[in-house]
Image: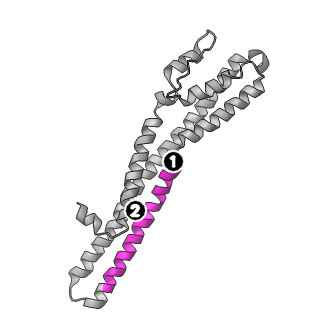
Amino acid sequence: MIEPLMSGGWVMIPLALFSVLALAICFNRFWALGYERVFPSFIQAALTDTEPIEITRNESHPSPLQNVVTGVLNHREDSVEIAVSAMEDALLVEVQSLERYLTTLGTIASISPLLGLLGTVLGMIEVFQALNTTGARDPSVFSGGIGEALVTTAFGLCIAIPALICHRHFQRRVNEFAQQLESEGRILIGRLFKSETK
């Protein structure tokens, strides 16, 4: 398995590194973008409770919802405008955190096919140079060389397709979470500043 892949030349080295990096990012984002990690049930329960809102802050692993809610609660004694501004600031920070590594994943999805194509082009150049040297008397030089050259394109596409799918999935999930975080924050502000929001 390793020998056919390495037949693609030096281009296979960055492609192999990209494949490992993309896999690590996908595992990381699947874990970080779990619904319970972003919207812990105990915080959502506190937000829907009719009693005064008190959130026990988890300092070791604060969730995005917890940070947005805490940003609002820290300004419950101020005006509604200050609370909204604090919510928006916290939301911006949390969305950036949720989007972590997604730019890298998208870059890998874009560059991998191009690197694969580069490997194929370099391989084809070597094939034609070999043909100029040996002539066309041995068809195996021609067909085998082309097969080896196409390995890089295939490998690049095998990296890019799942990376692109995961990137789109994670980006959509972040957008949905951002909307829900903003909604939760505005609901909380509405509860805390009932008289000012009427």
Query: Can residue 165 be seen in the rendering of this structure?
Result: yes
Residue furthest toward the front? 60
Crowdedness near tag 1: few (<14), some (14–19) or many (≥20) residues, C-alpha within 10 Å? many
Tell which circle, 1 or 2, labels the residue nearer the N-terminal end.
2
Q: Which quadrant is home to the C terminus?
A: top right
Residue furthest toward the top? 51
User: In the image, what residue occupies the spot 79% across and 19% down?
Assistant: 196
Q: In the shown orientation, is residue 142 left or right of residue 104?
A: left
Q: In the shown orientation, is residue 74 left or right of residue 164?
A: right
Q: In the shown orientation, is residue 46 left or right of residue 141?
A: right
User: In the image, what residue occupies the spot 29% across and 87% down?
Assistant: 131
Does the magenta-highlighted stretch encompass residue 163? Answer: no
At which x and y percent is residue 160?
42, 56
What residue sits right under mark 1 in the picture?
102
How many marks can you see? 2
Q: In the picture, residue 1 is in which quadrant? A: bottom left
Amino acid beneath label 1: Leu
Classify mark 2: helix, strand or loop. Answer: helix
User: In the image, what residue occupies the spot 76% across and 27% down?
Assistant: 82
Dominant SS of magenta comes to helix
User: In the image, what residue occupies the spot 56% across and 21% down?
Assistant: 57
Query: Can residue 135 be seen in the rendering of this structure?
Result: no
Q: In the picture, residue 115 is in which quadrant? A: bottom left
Give the magenta range. 103-129
What residue sits right under mark 2 in the picture?
14
Does the magenta-highlighted stretch encompass residue 110? Answer: yes
Near-viewer residue (179 or 16): 16
At which x and y percent is residue 89?
68, 35
